[in-house]
Amino acid sequence: MNSLLHTFAAEGPHISIAPETLFHIGPLIITNSQLLGLIGTGILLWIMLATVRALKSGSRSRGMHAVMWLFENLYDTAVEVIGDKKIAHKVIPLAVTLMLFFMVNNWLGLLPVVGPITYGEEHAPLFRGVAADLNTTLALAVISIVTAQAWAIKRRGFFGNAKRYLGNPLKDPLHAAIGLLEIIAEFSRTAALSLRMFGNVFGGEVLLVVIAFLTSYAAAIALPVFYGLELFVGAVQAYVFFMLTIAFI
């Protein structure tokens, strides 16, 4: 671990807002954030499958209890925010999946192997945090907002939902003005969801790189403090994404 931290520190600051392309599979571009995201998704699936097997076999391992404790608390939060257990049952799978996806990948992005290990002639970093890629956070934010709209249409009907945004400015100018603001708000919510996650995670990774570079061979002493802080921030940001997804729905 110390040798990895020393290598990380000696690399010098390499900051890129856009993810680096590693290779192509036909027309499909594979980036370093996608590669780490696939690993994180695999780890998350393994944890969930292991938890299901433990429940079916009657095991009472600490890992299973930790996952169940987290899920139960998230479920209680969803019921409290939404106020309807039936709706919460349908909403919770998406919201919890998004949170766990971000939490696992945010923590993976803090590993010392993310950055120093390079690939190809251009020596692009092999791994990059998923949430440090704005494409990923924007895509999942769009999924969250579109899901909220789908639920609104299902509950109110297409035209009933459209009436929330569209009003006759001659008959009810106040409602028309509020509807226009609500349309703008939908786009601002999408931007807020994606940029909040991206900004905090990307900023945390930049902070670690800068601290590692400044402390050089003392990085093994200085970095653990900041790693602990970023572990906390990564979990909190995942929880905020979960809460906002539920609140919008």
Image (cartoon, grey):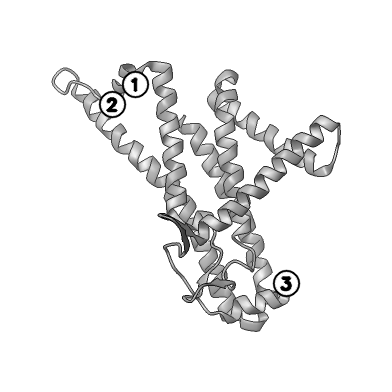
Q: Are marks 1 and 2 in contact (CB under 8 Å)?
A: yes
Q: Closer to us: mark 3 or mark 2?
A: 3
Q: Is residue 170 above or below residue 105?
A: above
User: In the picture, which quadrant includes the N terminus?
Assistant: bottom right
Coordinates of residue 85 in the picture (x, y in percent): 60, 20
Which amino acid type is marked by label 3?
A: Met
Q: Secondary structure at mark 1?
A: helix
Q: Nearer the viewer, residue 26 or 163?
A: 26
First of labels 3, 2 by sequence position: 3
Q: Nearer the viewer, residue 16 or 124?
A: 124
First of labels 3, 1 by sequence position: 3
Q: Closer to us: mark 3 or mark 1?
A: 3
Give the residue at mark 2.
165
Give the residue at mark 3.
1
Coordinates of residue 107 in the picture (x, y in percent): 63, 56
Q: Nearer the viewer, residue 219 or 30?
A: 30
Coordinates of residue 72 in the picture (x, y in percent): 69, 32
Give the residue at mark 1.
161
Q: For the point 42% across and 47% down, which residue is it?
A: 138
Kindly report the distance in space between the C-alpha atoms of the residues bearing marks 1 and 2: 8 Å
Q: Are marks 3 and 2 in contact (CB under 8 Å)?
A: no
Lateral position of residue 211 relative to residue 60, left or right? left
Q: For the point 48% across and 63% down, which residue is it?
A: 23
Q: Are marks 3 and 1 in contact (CB under 8 Å)?
A: no
